Image (cartoon, rainbow, N blue to C red):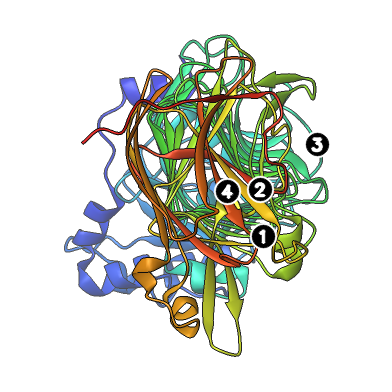
Amino acid sequence: MSDNQKFEKDSPAPISRRTLLASAGMAGAALVAGGFLGNSAWGAAEEREHPLASRLCGEDGACPIVFPDVTAMKAHAGTSGEVYITISYVAGAGCGGATYLNRGSDWPQVADGFGNHTDASGNYLELLEEDGIRNIDRYGADPTGANDSWAAIQHVLTHLQGHVTGCGDYSVSKPLVIRSATKLSGSIASTLSTPASKGSFTIRKVGNATVDGADAVLVFGQEGDSVKGIRCVVIEDVSLDSSSEAAYGMWCGRRSSFSISQAEFTRVTIRNCTNGIWLDNSWLVTYNKVSMGAGSSPGVGFYSGYFNSTSNHYYGCYTNSVAISYWVNSTYSSINGCASDGASEVAYRIGNMASINDCGAEFCKVAVQPYYTTKPIQVNNLLVICRGDGTTLVKNYFDNGSTVQTGSAVFYNCTFSANTAAKAALVTYDLYAVEAKKETVQFIDSYVTTYVPSSNSSVFTNVWAYTKIVDATNNHVAIHYGPYKKGIIVADSVLASDTNRYLLTRFRHDGTYVLTLERPESDALNNGANPFDRTLQVKFLLSGGKVALVNESKFDAVQQVTFWQRATHDNYVYVQIKLRGASAPATIQKIEGPGAETRYALSIYETPSNYTQIMPAMPIA
């Protein structure tokens, strides 16, 4: 049992600062709580004559004694029951002022230092906290950052816990260890103050000392602790910084049985660290408006995962110039309204049963990377601003750079914004799968957009119009395009007007499909034709790799619809439509049904390689 614990166990309940101030009247309470005592220093003989001392007297006529700092208070030979007010913890610092009660010499004595003090007569001086809030300045922390505050802050965190607060820029030489039932906070109003000394709460790590091997500003738990499940931690309105680029802002790494749960991080800013927040074995952790700006060696903005991680949620968070913005390998988790700027590797690396909702990614190398998933991750309303040198929309995770880990994803209502250069370099997917771990990627009502300044509007193009892909011939990767409201396929301009061309689309799911190709209404009218006479439509039924043709109509005699299967018998059905080059230089394609998969580029080859034509059943009503 620590000295503080013995003290608390053997002592009567301490008087609160608020109770003390109530006896001093409203004026006295305002003066002490509001910090209007000033920064002037005076001699010991003048202690009782300080002009404010008489204004804080109680009804019994007893007045508090005002000291310039803790050292002066300790030099005073006082008596039990006296009340002391210090202007600063250290002379001239202008911060750390507090109220103390002389408990007398018969109270249990504890080691002097931080919040524990004795006077010249050997009396214990109790620091009176206001509603249990521990201001680290009152325990010797230096808010100017000139001196190492690690010992003072760690003392409060270890022996007192509860609500710990500060107001300044604090230097620490080692990681601070956070344990259960701790709230570390600044003031939300003070975050708007400048300079930093007027309100913001910054913890700045100096050097690269470690705890449990982790070079971090904050570490959750430490080897040797009897309780390894860290619970009920709140960190808000705090900035974490590093003058020597710490490896982590916050860290609860893979150790013997350590975990963190029921934690909240709100309005936290992390700067000049390789990685932002790295939590293994985490659940029920909420991130609100947390931002991360990488140091000179960008790493991971936010990581939650490894083992038994679940129900971690991100709201309105932001990363800038990291390698991987969000690495969320925990089930039942979500990323909501968050942003990633300039991720050099991956914006969102997402694990099993996690989702991305209403987020953005600007100028990332890879937008989404499924990570050890057994079900497709859900990507909803994601905006990606593509890089001019190429953005890949979805890519496998490569473990240690060699072993491929499969993963599937579904994109709903997503927008991929790209200028001319970005469209030319855009990679739809970079995927690889094996027979035992097949993959599916689906784009539903998701488009590539290009802004046109002259018309102040954007042009929308279906994702399947961009055929720059990797491992496109892999039979274990199924790419679904659709359903779409409408998609435009533009003919290859190098084809002669009398050259036949072919559109091949792969279908996997059983069901009824209606595949429609038509020319734009304006194009048909300009040629003096009825738009409804310029339509090809085929309705067919798929069941277990077999095809039943329901009906077929076409607007050109050369048009032809045929059905194919691969020689490898993958049970997919491939529908090929034959067009003449001059028939539809801009053809609108629409698919209604369970969803189409890969659409192969228009080609001059009449018969697909390694395919066998299959004859559909007779038309049915």
**Rendered view: 234 above or below 94:** above
**Rendered view: 282 above or below 412:** above
Q: CA distance from mark 2 to mark 1?
A: 22 Å
Residue at 75%, 41% in the rendered image: 246
**Disc 2 or disc 3, which is closer to the eye?**
2
Residue to which mark 3 is pinned:
208
Which mark, residue 601? 2
Location of residue 506 in the rendering, given as x and y in whole percent from the top left corner: 53, 35
Q: Quadrant of residue 568?
A: top right
Residue to which mark 1 is pinned:
386
**Disc 4 or disc 2, which is closer to the eye?**
4
Mark 4 or mark 2, earlier in chain: 4
Q: Badges 4 and 1: C-beta atoms under 8 Å apart?
A: no
**Residue 41 in view here:** no
Left or right placement of residue 597 versus residue 126 in this view:
right
Location of residue 496 in the rendering, given as x and y in whole percent from the top left corner: 75, 64
Residue at 42%, 69% in the rendered image: 189
Residue at 35%, 36% in the rendered image: 540
Residue to which mark 4 is pinned:
578
Q: CA distance from mark 4 to mark 1?
A: 34 Å
Query: Helix, strand or loop at disc 2?
Result: strand
Mark 2: give few (<14), some (14-19) or many (20+) Cα within 10 Å.
some
**Disc 4 or disc 3, which is closer to the eye?**
4
**Which residue type does callout 1 highlight?**
Cys
Q: CA distance from mark 1 to mark 3?
A: 37 Å
Q: Badges 1 and 3: C-beta atoms under 8 Å apart?
A: no
**Which residue type does callout 4 highlight?**
Lys
